[in-house]
Image (tube, helix red, strand yellow):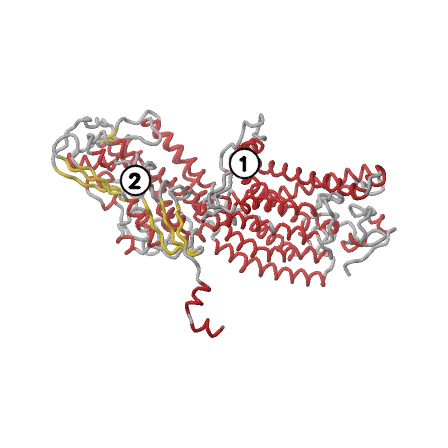
Amino acid sequence: MADFLINTVGLPEWLAWTITAFVAAALILNVIAGGALVFIWAERKIAARIQDRLGPTRTGGRFGWLQSLADGIKLLAKEDLMPEGADGMLFRLAPYISFCASFCAFIALPFAFDFVGQRLNVGVFFVVAVLGLEVFGVILAGYASASKWSLFGAMREAAQVVSYEVPLGMCVVVPVMLAGSMDLVTIAEKQAGWMTNWYLFHDPFTFVIFWVYVTCAVASVNRAPFDLAEAESELVAGFHTEYSGLRWSFFFMAEYGSMFLVSALAAVLFMGGWNGPIPVATLVGLSEGTGDTANYFVRLIGCGNLLLKATLGVLLMMWVRWTLPRLRIDQVMTTCLKYCTPIAAAMFAGAMLWQLAFPGGVVRGLSRPAGEIREGWLEGPGGLSPGRREPVPHVGAVGAMESQEVVQVVP
Amino acid sequence: MAQLIDDDPRIIEFDVRTDEMLVNMGPQHPSTHGVLRLVLRTDGEIVSEVEPHIGYLHRCAEKIGENLTARQWIPYTDRMDYLAAMNMNLGWSLAVEKLMQYQVSERARHLRVLIAEMGRIASHLVGMGAYGLDLGTFSPFLYAFREREKILDLFEEACGARLTYSYITVGGLTADLPPGWLRKCEEFLDQFEPVIQEYHSLLTTNAIFVKRTAAIGVMSPELAIEYGCSGPVLRGSGVDQDMRRDGESIYTAMYDGYAFEVAVMKNGHYPRDHAYPPVPTDAVLGDCWHRFFVRMLEVVQSMDLVRQAIDRYSACKGPLGEPVKLTEKIPAGDAYLETECPKGQMGFYLVSDGSAIPWRVRARSSSFSNLAVTHELCRGCLIADVPAIVGSLDIVMGEIDR
């Protein structure tokens, strides 16, 4: 878009980039916030169905699909209370930190090949690191609320999230190692083709580590059975006990944003990102060379693929939440330190050895070997130049690849 | 400097000292089962002391009882253990009948058993569902209430009320069952039986549930007896006592001819325990898991009793009998009777001077004694264990404060 503004419209470069950034930010913010509303509604309906209830049925005509919006309006109209003795600045700041951390991480998340806010060559680490910032908001909220329950919640969150980042990091490193890149776009691109190319099915170790990732992800976004920071039967509402109105809803949005983010990250890292289980586009001959419109269409479908996978992840979390009791804080820490971390470490070592022994994975898909896809940052004439990229074939097309120079990344 | 620190223990002490914090759990708290206030002395997540404060639901029920006739006080017993109002009605009615030496008809006796055991199922369903809620799982609570609703529907059909029944009364029951009620009750039991398996899979055998309850809040039989605990709390510690079998004759006579085994662990086994999930290896007799499990067993036991009562009641062709007059005079004297209510042994005491209005009325609440043991069980546990322990005692504040 920036190129279009510079070259065709003739805007100065800084202005073009600023406009592009604003448009991208607005898009991400609205899509994710809208998505959060949908997920909140979905959670109400799913929880209701699990519990033999109906959930919202009237708001918005049918199915109560406008319930989240109605709640949002109610929250806007509510008085924002601040407890006496609270640290005013920190109290106000905390929800925004949580919210920003959760939503900023979406910048690096690719929805389809070119549908990414900013392609980063350290995308994985950016997402994990920014997501980790969310805990600051929670700690600030707990500290600034001047409430003992909030403080307990914040301390639990700090202990839990910091511990779970260790196994989470180890799980994330495995696909990075297999792809030889930290760029989320490259990682997803390497899993193109049939479902067997997904890193989930790469070898037994990655299969196990995917489930470790799921556990750690649920813990790091504070969902049941690890929702200790807001354990309502013990800590009233944990860190957001004293929050109300819009500030509270920011925490809520951040939670649902993070849920979607970790699910989407799982989809990109282990389940081929925007690549469907069957390379339909390649089979019907819809790859590059068939025109921009077709390409765009393929990417739109890919975007749908990723959203579907991420939604499945979110639904899994909801299912778990409405089924299981909550763990105790010491049991949560035991799960992390005694089970998740050693298993993740062992699986990491196993995946490494497997990669040495059978570099191709268990079953090769019908498309080209994963190693033949070029690294994102090596593309273009100037290597690392941020300028216009040559379109890389979307899904594997062996014929097309033969004519191109291939940069081997994995030996 | 190092020398100085080593020499002066106070400096080290100050360096690593953590502050104790007094936290109020309740009276407005999601998991204190009403308006109970627990003052926790905490060191981080560890609770060093728990002190229950009661009295937020005090309604002078006993004093009111000294201004009303015995039958007029029945609705006030409804409001004691409002989750098992039928059993409260029964306790007071039997205490008055004991003083009056009144004998209800055979038909009323079987109907009382039927209704009281249905009340027990309804009460244990709340206890079980709310316990899941205390441990952070919401769905079993609603599954329990779904079944409880059906019992309440039956009660509504029988007496017109869904919570405060005043159905069982001095001298019998206010009305006979409507036609077709027994069939509906049997249908409910047939439908309810497989649902219990659902609760077992969601709670009793759930790995997280076992982790949260096994070996938590272990109460030795001696401690339970010392504090006067009763009901499932006492039997959960392995003490074999059930007022329906060991109580006074006026109460046990009601259960004459009924076959039931007290749900208590004897020689490492629960009665008929082959039909239930096995006891997890982590569980210790007297912990939260056993208290919960005893309640689950009592639900099955009560279902069995209801079935027997249906048979006997329908075999009884005699009249139900009229309850005593509202202004019936009570002979002078005093009487105390404990009955086995779902929460434990509920005792009613009345002194009469020969008029229709009792001179003194007192109630002995099982939840009160069961709650008193909290500070012993919660010593040194984690904050998350406090709701787990208090929930396993299954208290109801209406009965404690009266």
Q: Is residue B306 left or right of residue A99?
A: left
Q: Position of residue A54 (x, y in %)?
A: 51, 32
- Which image quarter holds the C terminus of chain B? top left
Marking on residue B390 = none
Q: Chain of mark 2?
A: B
User: Identity of the amino acid at label 2?
Assistant: Glu
Q: Position of residue B191 (x, y in %)?
A: 42, 35
Q: Is residue A198 left or right of residue B15?
A: right
Question: Is disc 2 placed on a helix, strand or loop?
Answer: helix
Q: Position of residue A342 (x, y in %)?
A: 58, 61
Q: How many marks?
A: 2
User: Identity of the amino acid at label 1?
Assistant: Arg
Residue closest to the far bottom: B3
- Tell me the CA gap for discs 1 and 2: 35 Å
Question: Would you name the residue on which mark 1 appears?
Answer: A44
Residues tagged by mark 1 and mark 2 found on one chain of the structure: no
Q: Chain of mark 1?
A: A
Rendered residue at 65%/49% (across/down):
A266
Viewer-proximal residue, A375 or B38?
Answer: B38
Rendered residue at 59%/59% (across/down):
A343
Q: Is residue A150 above or below residue B284?
A: above
Q: Is residue A401 above or below residue A351?
A: above
Q: Does any portion of residue B219 appear in the rendered image? A: yes
Question: Would you name the residue on which mark 2 appears?
Answer: B399
